Each structure stands twice: as structure tokens, then as C-alpha cells.
Image (cartoon, helix red, strand yellow):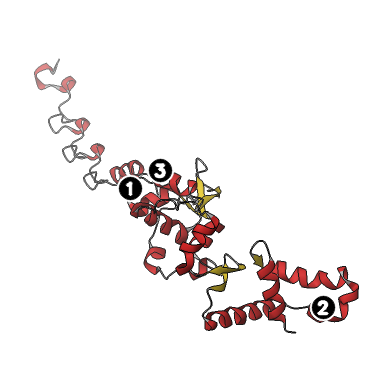
Amino acid sequence: MELKQILETIVFSAQKPMSIGELRALLRDTPEKLPDEAGLTAPFAKATARAVEKALEELALEHDNANRSYRLACVGGNWQFVTRPEYAPWLQVLVGAKPRPPKLSHPALETLAIIAYRQPITRSEMEQIRGVAVDGVVQTLVERELIEVCGEADAPGRPRLYGTTPFFLEHFGLKGLEELPAADELRRIQLELATVPADDSQEQLPLDNEATEADDDPDDDPDDDPDDDPDDDPDDDPDDDPDDDPDDDPDDSDGEENND
């Protein structure tokens, strides 16, 4: 008996997708809960996370190579058996599947891609990238359970932060966000992030910059001090008027000299 065979049985019989942690817990608890079977189950009780993951990956490869109508898939970090899409019509009739919701619009897909690659992200940051308002699109994505509020930004007004949901991974058949296609250009877009708190180190508002430029106006030459008017020659002291000769004292006038 091999570990992958035990895991195949558990995942096949489970009523929900199973994570590696849940599978390990089941392997660990089985010898304790069924002591009579400990001789059979104990060797697998200490299976490591890597051993479980490797066994599941080998099992998934075997199913793919066997070209069965179902396969073992990891969606959002949880393992489950899923049928192949080409067999969907018969299963829809069997289980009475609900009609699929309408496809996402092009703007909705654009916004969803921005959130997936740049999360957590605020609504204003989305609008910086798209260049248009995204209120209606965000509401649609929330209603479709593809995105959710995952916190608040550390910025004035405490704007909401949005991120993708586990259903997003399930909807697109992804094991995790690391399986998203490369989008280096989208990741490189520079944003004036609303998540950056405003402080004294931030750039001044344009009004402050204009005031600073006004103070540094080149027309205001510091040498052009009105007190230093070139017409006000320091040698032109009114007290030193050349017409006021100190020898021309009115009291010493020859016309009034008394020779008595």
C-alpha cells in the first residue's frame, strides 16, 4: 500500500476539496482513533507536507496520462477530483445545473486583472491605471464573489482595499496566484498609492510650490534695495551743500561791519 493510493481514496470520498494540512491531520489521527488498525496506518501518520504534495502530484500525472473523464486538480490550494469540460452537457442534465451567469464584460475583466496582479488595491488606484471610474464594475465583481474587501488603506479617509477571493481561484482553475500569467508591464505601472500616508516628506502642493517660486523671482534682485537708490548719493548730504560755505556767516557780513 502506497501513500498516494491512500490519498486518492480520501480525496475521492471526501465531500469537499481537501488541503494538504487536512490530509496530514487525517493521516496523523487515524492510528489514535483506530488503535486496532495502528499496524496498518501508523507508518503513514508522520508523512510530511512535501511527501503528501509529491504523492498528489504523481497521482494527478497518472490520471492525466490515463486520459480518464476526470482528473485530480489542485484549486486554491485544495485537492479534488473534477470532470473534464467536454463531459459537461450530460452532467448538467443529471444534476440540473443552474444557468451560468453572463460572461464578464471587457471592462470587468480589465479591472479584475488589475486587482489580481496589484492586490491589495484601492478603488482610486484602479482608476489611476484604467483612467476611468470603476464603481459599477467593482460592485459587479463583488456580487459575483470574485473580489472582496480585505482591509483598509493607511491613508486619509481609510479607503477600502480589494483583493481576489478563493472562488476567483476556483473559477479560473488556479492552484494559487503564482500561477497567474506573467504581466510584468502591469506590475511595473507606477501609482500615487493611496496606501502611503501623507506626511511632511511628501511633495508640497502646487500652491506651495508657486509661493516658493514667487519668493525666488529673479526680478526681485536683492541688490535693488529701494534704500540703496543710486540717486541718493551718500556724498549729496543736504548738510554739506556747497552753497552753504561756513565762511559766509551772515553775522560776519562786510556790509554790516562796524568800524567805530
In the picture, measured across the screen, residue 82 lies left or right of residue 2, that is: left
SS at circle 2? helix
Position above or below: 11 against 62: above
Q: Is residue 99 visible?
A: yes
Counting from the top left corner in percent of width and height, residue 219 is at 21, 45
Q: Is there CB contact under 8 Å for labels 2 and 1? A: no
The residues tagged by marks 2 and 1 sit, at their Cα atoms, a distance apart of 59 Å
**Which residue is disc 3 drawn over?**
135
Which residue is painted at 62% across and 80% down in the image?
59
User: Mark 2 vs mark 1: which is more N-terminal?
Assistant: 2
**Which residue is disc 1 drawn over?**
132
Q: Quadrant of the C terminus?
A: top left
Q: Residue furthest left?
A: 255
In the picture, measured across the screen, residue 216 lies left or right of residue 83, that is: left
The residues tagged by marks 3 and 1 sit, at their Cα atoms, a distance apart of 9 Å
SS at circle 3? helix
SS at circle 1? loop
Q: Is residue 198 visible?
A: no
Which residue is painted at 53% across and 83% down in the image?
65
Position above or below: 209 against 186: above
- What amino acid does circle 2 point to? Thr
In the picture, measured across the screen, residue 219 lies left or right of residue 170, that is: left
- What amino acid does circle 3 point to? Asp
Closer to the eye: label 2 or 3: 2
User: Mark 2 vs mark 3: which is more N-terminal?
Assistant: 2
Query: In this view of the protein, which residue sits in the foreground, 4 or 52?
Result: 4
Q: Is there CB contact under 8 Å for labels 3 and 1? A: no
Q: Residues within 10 Å of mark 2 (few under 14, many from 20)?
A: some
**Which residue is disc 2 drawn over?**
41
